[in-house]
Amino acid sequence: AIDVSELKVNLLCLEGRLGGEASSAAPQQACVPRLIPITGPWDTSAPAAARRRGGRAADKDTAIDVSEPYDAKPGDYPIRPKKKPSAPPKRSPPMSQFRSEEMALIQLFIQNDAANDTLHELGHSNAVQFKDLNKDRTAFQRIFVQDVRKCDDMLRIIRYIQDLMEAEGMQTGPEPRHPPVPSLHELHERLQDLEKEMKQHTASYAQLLKQRSELREHRHVLSGAAQWFQQARGGVAFTAPSDGADGGGSAELLNLLDEQEAGARTTAGSLGHIAGCIPTANLRDFAITLFRATRGNLLLKHDDIEQPFKDPLTQEEVLKSVFIVFFSGERSRMKIDKICDSYACSKYRLPEGTTQQDAAIRDVEERMRDLKTVLTRTKDYRMGRLEQLSEHHGAWMTYVLREKAVFHTLNLFNYDVTRKCLIAEGWCPASALQEVREALRRGQLKSGSNVQTVLNVVRTKETPPTYFKSTKLTKGFQAIVDAYGIAKYQEMNPAVFTVITFPFLFGVMFGDIGHGIMMTLVGLLLCVFEKRLLSSAKDEMFGTLYHGRYNILLMGIFATYAGFIYNELFSVPLEIFGHTAWCSGEMSDPACIDMHGVDPKGGTQKWLRSNLEQAYNFNDQQSTGKEVTWEVYPFGTDPGFAHTSNKLNSVNSFKMKFAIVAGVCQMVMGVCCKLMNTIYFKDSVTMLFVFIPEIVFINSIFGYLCLLIMSKWTTNWDSTFILNNYEVVSIPQVYCDATLSNTPCWTPPFMDNRDALFGGRLSRLPAHMWCMKDGVKTAGCAVYKLVQSSGFQYIVESNAFGDKTVMDPLGPYNKNACLADMAGSGCALWKQNPPSLLDTLIKMFMEIGSVPVASQVIPGQGGLQMFLIFIAFWSVPLLLLPKPFLLKKAHLAKKAAEDEANGITHHAHGEEGDEDEDADEEAPPPPPVEKKEAPAADHGGGHGHGEFNFEEEMVHQMIHTIEYVLGCISNTASYLRLWALSLAHAQLSEVFWEKTVVEIGVESADGTMLFVCITAWACFTVGVLMGMESLSAFLHALRLHWVEFMNKFFDGSGYKFAPFSFETMNDEVIE
């Protein structure tokens, strides 16, 4: 309900302003008060009129956002609706952690003059990810390609200056908060002049360094000339190049040298020489080549220069040697000259007389002093110039990088020639729309433009990017999830659970108090000094640790917690929370010495600490009516197990069962996340025919296994008995009174004479009804009172280990035999052993519905297993078949509805074909149509998947069903890695401690050896356990989350929200 005439006037006015000329329908002077402010709701109306007047065809379906009221000011003439707009719909609170932020597709119309400043403001807001509207154009066909090239050239020059500063060991100064940077064009010209100046200065400086090296070489050659000539006067032998001494004398060479010193004119056959400097590495090859070329008719003398020479271009140090070659003949001279040139030799002229040589040395030294002065001044000027540039280097680099990012982004925009404006589209979080509007307003004011930027919110079916607001704590765990795949838009975020489950599973595999505290301290130091260490995070190795500092901290905390559960400090058990529940073998505890049934002389470890004295009065030989209970270690594993022979069996049993329970719980949690996704996306088909079969299947088998594990853990097997091989009964350890009135109960402790108990009431029972062996006294035998219609009878616990026939259900002791004989000869009562859950799970499928009474953990176990197998079997076809057929049915219904709607539309158009075409101009604009662009190829997924293909959907569902059913088995077995790595970690830690510190260090009784062993143990601990083992546990925890947990619900077909931002900008990503 909008005043169409006023809307047209205002939009035509805006079009005239953008086109640089006033519109005939809306004069320029009347346009100013009608401009739509950027913060108002009607700023999205202008593009609608612009599109109706020849804009891009892709924009014709854009909707107008009129959800906010416009606050008019005095003098303004806003577009007024005919009626009050309805209140905006209430949106659910953002779930930036559980689900990605709600995104909006926005469209911007920006005047050319304001484009640069507007992009700068948006770059600071970090809220818009722009789309490429020029995909059909190459990089060289874009509008601002020349500006991008100019920025590239400036970056090249800035890097060149940076290389010069680094070569001189200078650091760039801190970037000013508000750097005084000139305009882009002025900066480009200034940088070009600086490059020209610095290149000329660098070339001149390099030439001076080269001259200094040449003078230095010349001086060394002149210094060795007198010595060489003096040796030549003593006699010269032409020999092959070797390390030996020179040969004998030669009168002919001496005469020639004397003639040369005397100034005589040399003839064609006189002795000549060539002196120079050569790299020491080439000297041997140089000598061999000379010898072969001249057939040995030469004398080579050389001497190494101790101080190396620095190459002025490469700055590499090179060792050199001076040499002189004596030869005879012009032909030899030509050969030697060519050989010297090929071996990069520097040749210098030697004066023939001693006087001239001394004068040449003085001249070279004088030139070197002058050159040193020139080099010093040149160096000072160079350093001063670079220091001046270092103050502006950071500001220039940041400015040019931002300008390049701005022009690179502007190349993504479409240019409207008619209205002379830039049209941009991009994604923006819905919560940041007001911030974007404010940034556009600041950009318009900063540029001084009279035309405001227009923002339009577009309704679309294109899949938006995924954006999660992460904190410093959750950023590392979000990176772990993103490494596997980016969550689909609005999909449940696994990182919420990963924050806890990942370090927890790591701690299970890396559990040790000492190792966990070490890792916690490392993570705590990285977190406390994170600002100081930020500059060092550029290193790849340290940067990995720095960015995962909170991961390391939590992993260390959970590893410490698991260490307390395992009760291991560097593999050494501790009694932190009290005494062990077992009596010490040395009988050092007075409570153990006074305990009944313990032999202090033998020092036997026989009994657990219990309240036996409170349950039975040994003085009066009477029961107190209290149940016997054993002391339990308050927290974690009892340290008494560390000194027993069955330590590994008990620890492995606990860790294996815990691994299965933790794994099944995490997989069930993953399936439940699928339920949350289906509820959010209102996918009832997936919820009913995917989630329900999956949750039923996994819980009917592996959830049932966890139930058996928990039942086995919480059952007191010392008071669980099998009665007549038929049923399981529980008999608490409460001692019987004198009249056996409190049955079921236990006989008095440490009394092995059954006939003397209770006035001989048990003497008439069969001989197999007694649990004590001859000479072995125990804490008592259980007594059960079996009541029948014909009377009752007492049944005493039998020693099943001494008589295996008692446990045979097909033997003489069973329910029917017991009922048939009132004397009790067919009755039996024996203590049940904890059944093997692995055998139970196997027989669940091999012997359906049949569970021996000795293997029962819960009542009615056989019928329950039959029911669970039944529902697990039928959940497979329910998971496979219904969904493809229901999707096909829905597709056919939707297609029929579309065909019917198209038929009605064509019929209506035919009836209205004769109406006047001018009526279209007076009619209100049609309702907005949603934009139906297909998602980009690199973004993966989307709502539209093309034509429905039943065969493809059926194959997909079949693969999913097979993968899920088999995956439940393999994934559950995969969680056993928690037990395996925990066992390996504990055993390695124990081996390092026992073999180094205990067996070598402590037993040697030598302080030095003990120190060496502790040092070696510390190196093994840090290198192997803290380094390799922690990495192994991290990788296994990573696999458990990626494969076992996330594949239950995670789609991962989204693409990450990458806004135009100056904060995350770097030169490598701006291509």
Image: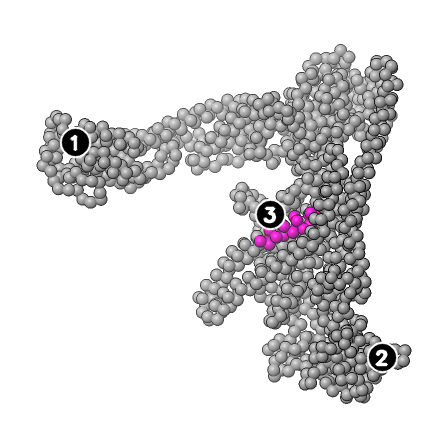
Q: How many residues crowd mark 3 within 10 Å: few (<14), some (14–19), many (20+)? A: many
Query: Residue at point 53% right, 29% down?
Result: 396
Residue 1034 falls within the magenta-colored stretch: yes
Which quarter of the picture shows residue 277? Answer: top left
Q: Quadrant of residue 85?
A: top right
- Please name the residue that numbered disc 3 is placed on: 548
Looking at the rendered structure, the secondary structure element under dot 2 is helix
Question: Mark on residue 862?
Answer: none
Around disc 2, counting alpha carbons within 10 Å, would you say few (fewer than 14), some (14 to 19), or many (20 or more)? few
Circle 2 residue:
820
The alpha-carbon separation of the residues under discs 3 and 2 comes to 73 Å
The colour scheme used here is one colour
Which one is in front, 922 or 891?
891
**Which residues are drawn in magenta?**
1032-1049
Q: Residue 807, percent across and down?
A: 74, 75
Identify the element where label 1 is drawn. strand
Q: Looking at the image, is 823 positioned above or below residue 651? A: below
Residue 23 lies within the magenta run: no
Question: Which label lies toward us, 3 or 2?
Answer: 2
Tell me which amino acid carries mark 3: Gly
Identify the residue at horizontal 66%, vertical 61% (top origin). 656
Q: What residue type is labelled 1?
A: Ser
Farthest-out residue, top? 24
x then y, percent, for residue 359: 20, 30
Pointer 1 residue: 328
Disc 3 to disc 1, C-alpha distance? 75 Å
Determine the image quadrant of residue 92.
Answer: top right
Disc 2 marks a residue whose amino acid type is: Ala
Residue pictured at 78% horizontal, 21% vertical: 76
